[in-house]
Amino acid sequence: MWDLLLKGGQVVDPVNGINDVMDVAIEDGRVAAVGKDLVGKTKAIEDCSGLIVMPGVIDCHLHLGSTFGGPNGMRMAALSGVTSCIDMAGPLGDILAHGHTDGAGLNVAIMDCFYPTQAYGVHHPTRAQVADYIDRMTAGGAIGIKLIGGHFPLPVETCRDMIELCYEKHHFVAWHAGSDTSKSDIDGMREAVETAAGLPLHLAHVNSYCRGRVRAPEQEAAEAIELLKANPNIFSDAYLSPLNGTMIDANDDGSLPDFVTRCCLEIFKLPVNADGMREAFKRGLLFIMKEGRGVTDIVGGTEGLAIWEAAGGKGMGCFTVNPAVSRLMLAQAKRDDGSFVVDSISTDGGVVPRNVIVPMGINLVKFGALTLPEFVHKASVAGARYLRIKDRGHLSVGAVADITIVDYSRSQAVETIVSGCVNMKNGQLYGQGMRVITSEVGAKAVRDKGHEAIVVDMTDMKVCR
Ligand SMILES: [Zn+2]
């Protein structure tokens, strides 16, 4: 007997070529049947008429750990319609610890961020130290390592070591472009792509290198597209929000430690110091993140500035720094074979309140920039393939029943189902804990910490599309 029958929704499953009004039956956490007017014994029926039923949304770039705000991220991602995600900074131990209470029912892959000054007390670690870090984090459950050069630069040699060693050791590696010799911009992106030199690399949030810092945003986006077309070894994500997310601390002398924050002020032609920050708040270009009840909000203007000053000029913030033209170009661009140049629509959200894959993605469909199956491909299929979670990202019979249900008219996710159980419905969270997507070497640590492990095959390191 089926556990649940989703009746009469617009089922969009590009892997199986389905985009039609159909029913989906779920049993024992898996898809039991898909078809028109299914008849069978079921414990529950849900009327999905007028709604889109798609494979669960997979956010290939968000933040769930304390580094970028706090533990609200899982809750906020789950409420937005996400079922699986890649955390892009960790800290690993922090996420594994608070996942029990704050997990919100998500499937989470963790890319731990490499800070050699913290881990080894050096800015330029040896290759042996890089290898040691990879071994320790992946044995602890991380699926790979994130280089966060855009915010906190490292030597290019260190980034190259990391990419080579992750390849040799069969783990993922991601890079927020930027290094000792480049910034978080289109030139930094070119350097990252060249440094990878054909090896697999997840290039984070391509849109953030197309903000018009070096050349016009549309020209930068065109360059980014050409770079990615020429380098299929690069998996990439881009997000759709106009807001970025960055550390907005100011030092006592008014200088700013975070390189992304400095770049933003440069783009707005404001002084690169605390006074520039004050002006950015006043002009509505900068918002500060503020803890709400279980979610994080952003506050701008004089109120935001007052919060920032009261916190001693410290906090996490968002600049309205992502031009529409580059976001649109990167969302649409295709290779000659028809596949997307930028693999997935991400959020870089989680704790940063911009979990807008569904609202902004559906608005792109309404705008005519993407078809509905194309949106589903970028929002779910691409992430499942990249993560090698082979029984997710589609609704084949036998696939894990991870499903996102979307109200097209409101451009909103109204329900998610994870492993056959309702995880979120109408803004209410039901899911608890988390499953951790990890490789063979991390599975034991994940289970020892009391989480279910989704173990993926990393034998072949070629980027899976
Ligand atoms: Zn990020």
Image (cartoon, rainbow, N blue to C red):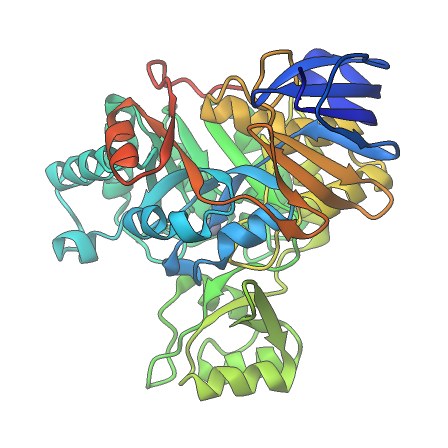
Residue occupying image coordinates x 41% and y 17%: 462
In the rendered image, which quarter is residue 2 located in? top right
Residue 457 falls in image quadrant? top left
On screen, residue 122 versus residue 264, left or right, reads: left
Please name whichever residue, 108 or 300, is drawn nearer the observer in this view of the structure: 108
Asked whether the viewer can see residue 113, the reply is yes
User: Residue 210 at x, y = what percent?
Assistant: 59, 49
Q: In the image, is 110 to the left or to the right of 141?
A: right
Which residue occupies 73% across, 36% down? 405
Q: Is residue 113 above or below residue 406?
A: below
Q: Is residue 313 above or below residue 6?
A: below
In the image shown, does 212 or 236 lie closer to the viewer? 236
Quarter of the figure that contains the N terminus:
top right
Residue 269 in the image: x percent, y percent? 57, 72
The residue lying toward the viewer, choosing from 88 and 335, is 88
In the image, 340 versus 77, the foreground residue is 77
Left or right: where 335 falls relative to 44: left
Q: Position of residue 334 (x, y in %)?
A: 68, 26
